[in-house]
Amino acid sequence: MATEYGDGYGYDGWGEAGGGRRHRVPALLRAPFEGRGWREFGYVVLGLPLGVVMFTYVVTMVSLGMGLLITFLGVPVLALALAGSRGLGMLERARARALLGVEVAEPEPPRRRGRGAMAWMGAVLRSGSSWRQLLYGFVQFPWAVFSFVVAVNFWAYGWALLTYPLWFWVFPMWAGQDGLQLYGDESRAVYLDNPFEVTVTALVGLLFTVATPWIVRALTTVDRLMVRGLLGPSRLGARVVELESDRGVVIDTAAADLRRIERDLHDGAQARLVALAVDLGMAKEKLAEDPRAAARMVDSAHGEVKTALQELRDLARGIHPAVLTDRGLDAALSAVASRCAVPVVVDVELPARPVPAIEGIAYFTVSELLQNVSKHAGASRATVDVWKVEGRLMLQVMDDGVGGADVSGGSGLAGLAGRIGAVDGILVVDSPVGGPTRVTAELPWRGRV
C-alpha cells in the first residue's frame, strides 16, 4: 500500500518539530529556510530533465512498437517499452521517497504463464501496472514543464527582489542606468532607484519568497497523487497479494496444528496406550501365578486409561471444544477462564452467534492470550471482554501483570496476529514495561444464517 509518513522529515506540516518543540518564528516566515521546502523544490527542478527522458523513451518506443505491429517485431518492442517503464517507475518511486517522503510499495509483478521469452512478453503486456507506469511517462512530462516554470520563476523573482537592496548598485555602476527598470518607452523610463522604491521592491520579493514554498508544495501534491496512483500497486493487485499471503498463513497454521496434534497423540495418548497394552499383557501372564500382583497391575492400568482419556479430551478440546459448538462463546470462554492460573472475569455481550469459523478464531485467540497470562504475565487478575460494534467482533484481554509483551518475529503473539490477519482481523498489543497489558483483537462479524 502506498503510505506517506507525515512530511517524512520530522515536521508536522510546516509547524511543529517532530520532537514536539515549538518555534518562535511563525511557520509562514520559516518555510523558505526549512529543509522540506528545498527538497520539494529540488524534486520539481529534477522533474523536468527526468520527464524529458521518460517522455522521449515512452513516445519513441510506443511509436516504434505500434508502427511495427504489422510485423511480429512490434510485440517485443512494446514489451521492452513496458519493461523500461517499470525501471523508470522504480527510479521515480525512489526520488519521491527521498525528496517528498512518500513511501509507495512496489507494484505487483507480471504474472508469467510458462517459461521463455514469449511467456515473459505476454506477462508484461497483460500487466496493468506496467501500462500504468507507461502512462506516467506521458502525463508526468507536461506537468513537470508547468511545475518547473512556475516554481523556478517564483523562486528566482522572489529571491532577486528580496535581495535587491544588496545589489541594486550594479545598475548605476556597470549598466549605465539608475536602477532596475520597471517601465520604459521612447519618452520615459521608470527605475527603482530611491530608498522607498528599493524597500517596496524588497517587500514584494519577501511576499514571493514566502509564497514560493507553499506554491511548490501545492504543485508536489499533484506529483504525490500521480506517484501513488500510477506507480504503486492497484487496489485489486494489492488485495490479491494480501490474500495470497493470508492463504499462505492459513496453510502454514493448519500444517502446524496438524503437526502439534500428531506430536501430542504420539507423545501422550499413544504412548500411554502402548504402555497400557504392555501392562495388561503382563497382568494376563501373572493372573494364574500371582492374582494379587495381577490385580495391582490391572488397577495401575485402570489409572493409565483414565489419564489417557483425559489427554484425549484435552486434545479434542484443543481442536474444537464441544462446549463452543453447543453453547457458544460465553460458556466456552468461561470454561477457559476457569482453568486459568489467575482469577478471570468474562463479559460477553453479543446479539447473536457469529459463524463457526469466526467463533473458533475468537475462542482460540482468548484461550492463547489467557495461557500467556498464566505462564508469563505474573498477574493477579485478568478480564476478558467480547462485544460487537459496527460489523466487527471485538475481543479484549487485560491483566495487571509485568507487561513487556511484544508482537515480534517468532513470538506466540506474532503467530496469533498472523492467524487473525488471515481473516482480515487486527491484533493490537498495548503492554508497557511494568504493565498493565491490554491486547485487543478485531475480527470481521459474520452472523449465522
Image (spheres, helix red, strand yellow):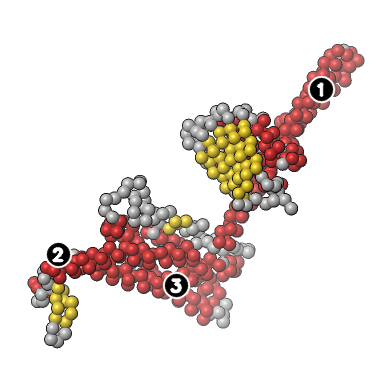
Evaluate whether residue 171 shows in this view.
no
Q: How dense is the environment of label 1, judged by Cα within 10 Å: few (below 14), some, or many (20 and up)?
A: some
Q: How dense is the environment of label 3, judged by Cα within 10 Å: few (below 14), some, or many (20 and up)?
A: few
Q: Is residue 436 left or right of residue 36?
A: right
Q: Report the residue marked by disc 1.
A: 302
Q: Nearer the viewer, residue 419 or 385?
A: 385
Looking at marks 1 and 2 on the same chain, the residue that comes earlier in the sequence is marked by 2
Instruction: Report the residue at 67% width, 51% height from top.
Output: 446
Q: How dense is the environment of label 2, judged by Cα within 10 Å: few (below 14), some, or many (20 and up)?
A: few
- Residue 370: image location, x then y, percent: 61, 34
Identified by mark 1, the residue type is: His
Residue 113 vs 387, above or below: the answer is: below
Q: Nearer the viewer, residue 96 or 60?
A: 96
Q: Which is closer to the viewer, label 2 or label 3?
A: 2
Per the image, label 1 sits on a secondary structure element best described as: helix
Identified by mark 3, the residue type is: Val
Identified by mark 2, the residue type is: Leu
Residue 381 vs 121, above or below: the answer is: above
Q: Report the residue marked by disc 3.
A: 139
Outermost residue, right side: 288
Q: Answer with the quarter of the image where residue 195 lies.
A: bottom left
Q: For marks 1 and 2, give the CA distance.
A: 104 Å
Q: For marks 1 and 3, give the CA distance.
A: 81 Å
Q: Which is closer to the viewer, label 1 or label 2?
A: 2
- Residue 188: image location, x then y, percent: 13, 83
- Residue 246: image location, x then y, percent: 61, 51
Looking at marks 1 and 3 on the same chain, the residue that comes earlier in the sequence is marked by 3
- Residue 217: image location, x then y, percent: 36, 63
Q: Report the residue marked by disc 2.
A: 166
Q: For marks 2 and 3, give the CA distance.
A: 41 Å
Mark 1 touching mark 2, by CB under 8 A? no
